[in-house]
Structure formats: C-alpha cells, structure tokens
Image: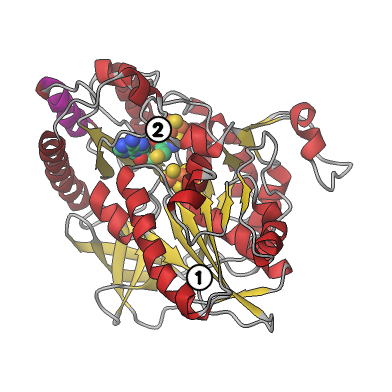
Amino acid sequence: MNNLIADIDIISGEEAQACDFKTTVDENTGKTRKLYIESYGCAMNFADSEIVASIMKEGGFDTTSDFYQADVIFLNTCSIREKAEQTVRKRLTDFNRAKRNKPEMTIGVLGCMAERLKERLLEEEKIVDIVVGPDAYRDLPNLLSVAEDGQKAVNTFLSREETYADISPVRLNSNGITAFISIMRGCDNMCSFCVVPFTRGRERSRDPYSIVAEARDLFSQGYKEVTLLGQNVDSYKWSPEENNKARLNKKEDEVTAVVNFANLLEMVALVDPALRIRFSTSHPKDITDEVLYTMKKYDNICKYIHLPAQSGNSRVLEMMNRTYDRAWYLERVSKIREVLGEECGISSDMITGFCSETEEEHLDTLSLMDLVQFDFSYMFFYSERPGTLAAKKYADDIPLEVKKRRLSEVIAKQSALSHERNKLDLGKEQLILVEGVSKKSAEDFKGRNSANKVVIVPKGNYTLGDYLKVKIIDCTPATLFGEVIEINPKH
Ligand code: SAH
Ligand code: SF4
Ligand code: F3S
C-alpha cells in the first residue's frame, strides 16, 4: 500500500521510491525540544509516524521541518523493495552531516527496515543511535534516555496485541480535510514476494469503538474524509472474547457481537453523512459481497476499491501464494461491477518479472488489465527480499532489463487505460471534496471524486473542505478537469 498519495496516479516502483516521503512540519506548542521525522513507504507507516509524534509530544517534543534544528531525527523506514532501503541509507549520510555540527543529536531508525535488520543496522550505519520496530513505539521515551546516556538502544519486539488504540495521533502534514485511521496491524498472508509479515508481525484488529471515536473526533475538528488502513482490511475482525483484554473504557451499552469489516464500514459511515469513508487495501481472496452491499448502501462510502492483482497469470499467482487465480479475480471484479456499477473505481498493484515468469505469462497480466479496465495501478518490477518465501524457494531468474521492459509495457498499458476510463467521465456530474491547491496552478483547487480520481477546478470562492458538484469537461490520463455546478449540495 505505497498507495494513498492523493495525486500521483500512475507510478512505477522507481518513481515511487524517489518522491514518496513525508516530513514533519514546524510546530510550536512551547515544548523545549525538537523532533524531525521523515517517513517512507506506505500509508500505514505515515499513520505510525503520527502515533510516534504523539508519544514524543508527551515526552516534551515539538516537530520541526528542518532536520538541522532537530534534537532528535527519526527515519521511519520501508523495506518493501531493495530501492526503498537504499534510499534510507543515502538519507542517513545527509543526517550524518547535521550530526557533525550537533554531536548531541540523536538519530533513530524506525519502521520496517529497523525490524528487518535489528542490531545489524547499528553495525552497518554507525550514526544510528536507536533502532525501533513498528510495535515498540511506546518504548521510545525510554530508548531515547538510554541513547542520551551514550548507549545504543534497540527494541524490535513484535506484539500480538499492540494496536495503539488509545493514542491520539498528532496529524502531520495535514490538509485538515483528509486523514488516515489505522484499523489493524500486521499481515498473516505470506505472499511469497513480500517482507511485510516479517516486518509488521501477526495480524490484529483494533477496537472498533476506538476507530469510531477517532473518526468522530476528526469530523468534529473539520475533517471531511477518513481512510481506514490495513494491509488486508477485508480480514478485519474484532471479537469481544479475543480482544477484551485490550479494550479500554468499555461502556455498558456497547454491542458485544463480532465486528467484521462490513460492520466496521457501516459504523464509521454512520458518524455523519458529510464524512467520506475510504479504505485500503482490499485483498481479492477476502473481499466479500457484504462489503460491496455496504458500500452501495451508504453514499458517503466512496465507490473505489484498491484490489491488487499482482499478476494476471494463475501459475504466477500460485507461486506468489496469493491464494486466488485469474478466474477468481475476474469474478470479484464482475461482482463489483454488478453491485456498484461501471463508475466504481478499481485500481491494482502489479509486479513484473516475478521468478520464472514467461513472456506469455506477462501477456496475461496485460490482458487482465484490458479485461478489468483499471482506473490506475501502482506498478513495480520484482525485487527479491531476503528471508521471504520466494527468496528461499525460487530463483530470481528474470534479467533486470527484461523486468524493466515488462514494467514499461505494463505502465504504457495502464496509461492508455487510465485515459480511456477518464474519457468516460467527460460530461458527467460528480461530487468532489476540495482538499488542496493544484500542484500545477495556484489558481486552481484539486479535489477527488468518489472513484478517487483527482479533479481540478478553478478556485472561485470555494474553500478547502467544500463539497462541489462539478461537470467533467476535460481530462488527461492522470487528471480530470471540472466546472462547478453547485457548492455543498445536500448530502
Ligand atoms: N497489502 C497489500 C500490499 C502491500 S505492499 C496487498 O496485499 O495488496 C504494496 C505493493 O508492493 C504490493 O501490492 C506489491 O505490488 C508490491 N511489492 C511487495 N513486495 C514486492 C517485491 N518484493 N518486489 C516488488 N514489488 C513488491
Ligand atoms: Fe504483503 Fe501479501 Fe500481506 Fe499484502 S497481503 S502485505 S502483499 S503478505
Ligand atoms: Fe509499509 Fe514498506 Fe513496511 S510498504 S508495511 S513501510 S515494508
């Protein structure tokens, strides 16, 4: 799920690594020390940085956007592809320069790369003082004081229970309109190419009442859209028996039934009709008809599903251990179309050049893309990750130039499909939520329609957080352009 950056529609693996990071902003609430966090990887990592900022705030830190001013620098890292780790190592050399001017500065590596490499990271990167895995952030104040005493500090314990349910994230880089809410952690799927089960540990779901409370709180602060996050949201499951120990502030009148993802979606949709709900990522093996019907029932649940296929060939899918085949994937897409119609946005992740993938099998990926007509995709060439099932069982035998050529074919296909899909929107009236100024023109706002497509409109007298009914008048493969018909129509 490297995937929720609002206005990057089509990215290749390499581009994603080059541009896909976020930093903290300047904040001054009178704390004495400054924290700089730079976050890489998926939306879950960005959401984790907001938890880290909250824990550090309690410990006396405001955030800064300038790492030279920081007392503590945290790099929240990603291990998904080799390139992601290389980027982090390069960044550490920049931080080394800052530390030379300010030797008392503490540098911590957080997240998936910390979890994967553990103590080894301290040996390999001498400037690192603290190594902390994704389930150990509550220990940060303690690790920091160890580091300030001049020792190295490591905690990469993976938990079966930790969901940080009681921590109110400090919103970083926020537009004040859209926010992420983590609903679960970890992943039990063991796709053979993927490092996430090793870096994030076992799957666990967060208390639904804490999720609804967070959504309500965001709405009361003026937020208009929440995205529910998990590596596999369709396997969200919370039951009082299993999770009671972790429950906080249990109220007498709460329902005690098992809550599945469809139930959770409904609970969040009921917070307010003016709060939009999105979610990511859906797994083709787990997405249920019940989820689709719940989406249909509520206008404020956006009609968009990120449903990574990874490959269009059943043999490759089996080697990837995705536990579905091409026919299953296509059936799920038909069901989406049947319940939610042609306008529902569907996007995918694709990997080219997985172990032993033949040219014909690669063509199956291209033909699957044609059949589904994805609105957009995040596309990568296969990068072998140490310790994964694929690294143990299969040879990484597709030459790099072949992986890259196949990737460029997949990207070209997606670009053409995105353009075709966007053209279907021409002349249509759609509801968008205004969430920022257009990157290309200060005179324009950008918003997104229900299907998650970026729509550019002239600024007019509108403000961030307005819902606008627009008519789509033009498009490129990546963007729609609209003219405003009505402001804040009734929900
Ligand atoms: N949980 C999500 C994906 C998380 S990782 C899911 O199951 O779909 C985001 C994407 O990175 C994956 O969908 C996959 O396309 C890509 N990816 C993961 N491991 C990779 C690897 N070793 N090489 C290349 N791409 C990879
Ligand atoms: Fe990785 Fe598969 Fe889990 Fe996604 S579902 S995080 S690809 S193991
Ligand atoms: Fe996310 Fe990267 Fe970890 S994609 S879960 S930060 S390996």
* The image quarter in which residue 350 lies: top left
* The image quarter in which residue 364 lies: top left
Three-letter amino acid code at the position of disc 1: Thr
Q: Which residue is mark 1?
A: 24
x and y percentages locating residue 400 in the rendered image: 15, 37
Q: Is mark 2 within 8 Å of ligand 2?
A: yes
Is 362 one of the magenta-colored residues?
yes
Mark 1 vs 2: CB contact within 8 A: no
**Outermost residue, right side:** 252
Q: Residue at x 59, y 40 (%)?
A: 184
Is 353 one of the magenta-colored residues?
no
* Direction from residue 429 to residue 191 in the image, left or right: right
Asked if 340 appears above or below 189 in the picture, the reply is: below
Front residue (pair 395, 17): 395
Ligand 1's quadrant: top left
Q: Which residue is mark 2?
A: 194
* Direction from residue 333 to residue 199 in the image, left or right: right
What segment carries the magenta color? 360-371
